[in-house]
Image (cartoon, grey):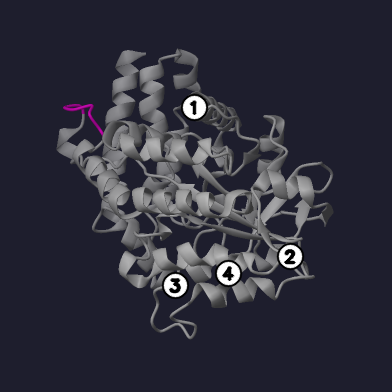
Amino acid sequence: MPAVCFYFQVHQPYRLKTVPFASIESDHSYFDDVKNGAVMKKVAEKCYLPTNNAMLKLIKKHGDQFKISYSITGVAIEQMQQFAPEVLDSFKRLVDTGNVELIGETYYHSLAALYDQDEFRAQARLHRELIQRVFGVTPRVFRNTELIFNEYIGSLANSIGYETVLAEGWDDVLGWRSPNFVYKVPGSDLRLLLKNYKLSDDVAFRFSNKGWECHPLSAETYASWIHRLSGSGDTVGLFMDYETFGEHQWADSGIFEFLERFPEYLLKHPDWSFLTPTEVTSKFPVVGELPYTRLTSWADTERDISAWRSNRMQERALHDAFELGPKLRASGNESLLHIWRKLLTSDHFYYMCTKWFADGDVHAYFSPYDSPYEAFSFYMNTLRDFQRWIEKAL
């Protein structure tokens, strides 16, 4: 019996205050609590609370036939605790059903796997401890920031105890293979569970596009597309941002009605079910090795890391930020470490991307700045202030 594996990313960054050059060393309060609180409350109202309520109803309706999974970043949990504790309570109720798996990742949603393996391990450990403390469960599957993956990152995840990693099932990596099977990294036992990007993006990106030939997409039609895969795959990985529901695809698009009815139509086919990532890798065999010799992600049309590292601004900001790591970790100053790590969140560098066309539109949609150059300027002003602060403090 094949299965759908529903996985959702839940993340909110700490957005920076706009720090002009003249204000360097005058104020060490870097993060915009007013804006961050407003965004968290808005997304809570539009997405988190109504979607969690819908998921809970689906679990009560379908029982063990309906399973889902989430990775929730540490910085998102912190902001829920500060600005919207009712959201965190609603996630706890979902986890308590036993039908939800929580996935491990980097606490600060950082690019540490690309720059600093010690920092990567530290952030993965901090996230696992947070999930244990808040939800009472221990993650068994890992998802790196933005699904950024290659075999080296797989070895890092494996070295800290993870036996399964989520990754993008992109065409040039798969070649002739299908994303709808369980694979493993060559030369290891690390299992790979892949995103079916076409079916995922039909909901995450195309659902409300009136120019799309399949608009409006009904739950019945979508389920029929998946049913057609019977006999040609073990699992369909539907991976997407949780904000797909209500935030990226607004309520008036019909996205909540779609979510409510999709499980019903999928389960009408007796061969199909919903499973968590751990259940998928326990039930289905590894069909072969899958080399990931280049860095992949789930972002932009290239599915590489160019969303965060494709121009000199991003390269400079990343270099200068990660350069502080050894000194700060050696200091043992937890307060400064926490501030620095919030400055490592990948969103800061995403805002500096200078791409055009469709990818550029997506970057602009998420950015709180008027331009990538403004994002770079304010980030570097903040980083310069922080560098001078730690020079005095340490």
Q: From this viewpoint, which residue is outermost toward the front?
A: 61
- Residue 202 rendering spot, x and y as whole percentages: 51, 71
- Depth check, mark 4 against mark 1: the one in front is 4
Relative to 287, does residue 394 appear above or below in the rendering?
above
Visible in this render: residue 237? yes
Q: Residue at x 32, y 14 (%)?
A: 393
Q: Amino acid at mark 4?
A: Tyr
- Depth check, mark 2 against mark 1: the one in front is 2
Element marked by disc 2: loop
User: Which corner quadrant of the image does residue 41 belong to?
Assistant: top left
Tell me which secondary structure the magenta stretch mostly adopts: loop
Between marks 2 and 1, how big is the CA–CA gap?
37 Å
Which badge, 2 or 4, is on the more N-terminal residue?
A: 4
Q: Amino acid at mark 1?
A: Leu
Q: Quadrant of the C terminus?
A: top left
In this figure, which residue is indicated by the disc labeled 2? 271
- Residue 161 rendering spot, x and y as whole percentages: 70, 30
Q: What is the crowding at mark 3: few (fewer than 14 residues within 10 Å), some, or many (at least 20)? A: many
Which badge, 1 or 3, is on the more N-terminal residue?
A: 1
The segment highlighted magenta reads 25-30
Which badge, 2 or 3, is on the more N-terminal residue?
A: 3
